[in-house]
Structures are given as C-alpha cells and as structure tokens.
Amino acid sequence: MSQLATVSSFVEGAPPGELADVIADIKNLTIDNPSLLSQLGTAFEKYNEEQFATVKLPGSSQHVIVSSHNSLGDGRYYDVESSSGFAFDHSTQKASEVQSYVLESSQSDLVKSLLKSLATHTKEHYPNASYGVYPIENDSKIAVLVVANKYSPNNFWNGRWRSLYIYSPSSSQLEGSMKVDVHYYEDGNVRLLTTKPVSSSISSASAATIIREITVAEKKYQEEVNKGFNSLSEGAFKGLRRQLPITRQKIEWDKIAGYRLGQDIGGGSSKR
C-alpha cells in the first residue's frame, strides 16, 4: 500500500468530530513529505460526503448537510430548505460562495412536504440534528438524510448518528440504513460502529406516512442499541476483568508512581 493510500485510510476512518485531530497527526507523521496533505482532496471529499458533514452557511445559524445526494459537482452543494447553493472546502469544512438555488423537480411537492414532517420528527426525537431531502437518480427517487452529532472532547468521547432512506414513489418502497459511530478514548481507545438496514413498503405516498415509518424504525433501533449496551455492561465486559481488585478498592496508580519516585530519589529501597 502506498503512503498516500495509507494516509487516506486514516482520513476516511476518522472518528466523529476528530478530523482536525487526524489532520494534525498526519502533519506530524509526514514532516518529510509536506506535499502529501495537499494530495488528500479525494479522501476528504469521500469522508465528508459519507459522514454527512454539516456546515453553517455564511449569515445563517442553521447547519446544512454535505453529501453525494445533494452534490452539484465541482465542490458545490445545495440545500432545499434554504434554497441555497454553496461551495464547500473539504479540507477546512467551510462553506462559501452562497447563491440562490431553486429546486426543479417533478417531486418538489413531496420533497417539501417531507422536509416539513422531518423537521418535526428531528425536533421531537433529537436534541440537535440536521436533515435534508433531495430528489435523486434522475428524479425517480427521493433521499432522506438525518445526522446528529454529539461531541464531548473534555470527557473523551464523541458520537454521530446517521440515517439514510431512499424512497421510490413508483414501487412505494423505503430502503435505507441507520448508523451509530461512538468513540471513547479516556485511558484507552474504544469505538462502537453499528449499522441497521431498513426495508419497508409504504401504504400511502404521503410525507406523514413515510416519516411515521422512519420514526418507528429509529425508535426500535435505539431500543435495540440500549439493550445491547446493558447486555455488554452486565455480561461480556464483566467477564473481561474485575471491576475492582480483590481488596475492593481502586488502585491509585498516580500515588503508587509517586511513592516509587520518592524512594528512588531518597535512595531507599522499593521493596518492603
């Protein structure tokens, strides 16, 4: 594997909210090849589109989504709700050159109805989420996207929820998936990556019916994830090691290291 391919895999595997940290590490690791970073444009674009990167447009407080489903080509994307087209820098994750964009689609009425219902859905079920609805595949299908990010670097964890649903009006089928990505890195490095496929027939081609089906699927998946965590906590994790030593007290490693250091400086013996 070439150095570029290796470094690109680092970018594409960056945990939620940690792309800037990964870029900083790449700079430190490739000091002898400073031009390598400028060759990662394709990797940055793939990461941002697959992760549904969100960005605030200049002069706006609302985040919009960057994905392959709302790409206009040449680094430009559009947002239906704000009727805006914009340029997106994949390396800095900044938006610029905002222009008016009017959606021209035979599915525009359903798209706008879905946006309205989706706004209510995300407000009720997510503390903070971005969403988008876009006609795709030559106007034959509609993509529904939801992404929710929760970053807590001070507590050594970051997480992301992504939902993608493709609705086909001709077959009344809803296909898609829900993905959860959580990274916990306090005194270790643990990452949870889960994917849940969705497939269902829609009885009525209305926005309310489609979003209702999405709501049921997401609620069921969240309950499954919660049960999985409880099972791991009470089962597998307990089987890996004792929660406390035999003394039933936590070992204070910092103090032990301090005691040893004091003995060494004082010329004493570390043995008892």
Image: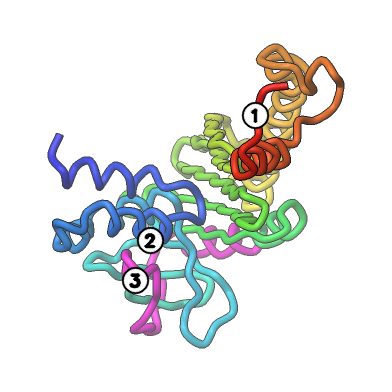
Which quarter of the figure has residue 5?
top left
Tell me if residue 53 is in the magenta stretch.
Answer: no
Q: Residue at x 29, y 42 (%)?
A: 9
In the rendered image, which residue does mark 3 sit on?
A: 88
Residue 113 picture location, percent across and down: 60, 61
User: Under tag 3, what secondary structure?
Assistant: strand
Instruction: Name the amino acid, label 3.
Output: Phe
In the rendered image, which residue does mark 1 sit on?
A: 269
User: Under tag 1, what secondary structure?
Assistant: loop
In the rendered image, which residue does mark 2 sit on?
A: 70
Marker count (numbered): 3
User: Under tag 2, what secondary structure?
Assistant: helix
The answer to which of marks 2 and 3 sits earlier in the sequence is: 2
Alpha-carbon span between mark 3 and mark 1:
62 Å
Which quarter of the figure has residue 2?
top left
Q: Residue at x 21, y 58 (%)?
A: 31
Tell me if residue 111 is in the magenta stretch.
Answer: yes
55 up-or-down from 205: above or below: below
Q: Indicate which label's residue lies in the foreground, 3 or 1.
A: 1
188 up-or-down from 106: above or below: above
Instruction: Name the amino acid, label 2.
Output: Asn
- Residue furthest to the front in view is 267
Residue 1 picture location, percent across and down: 15, 34
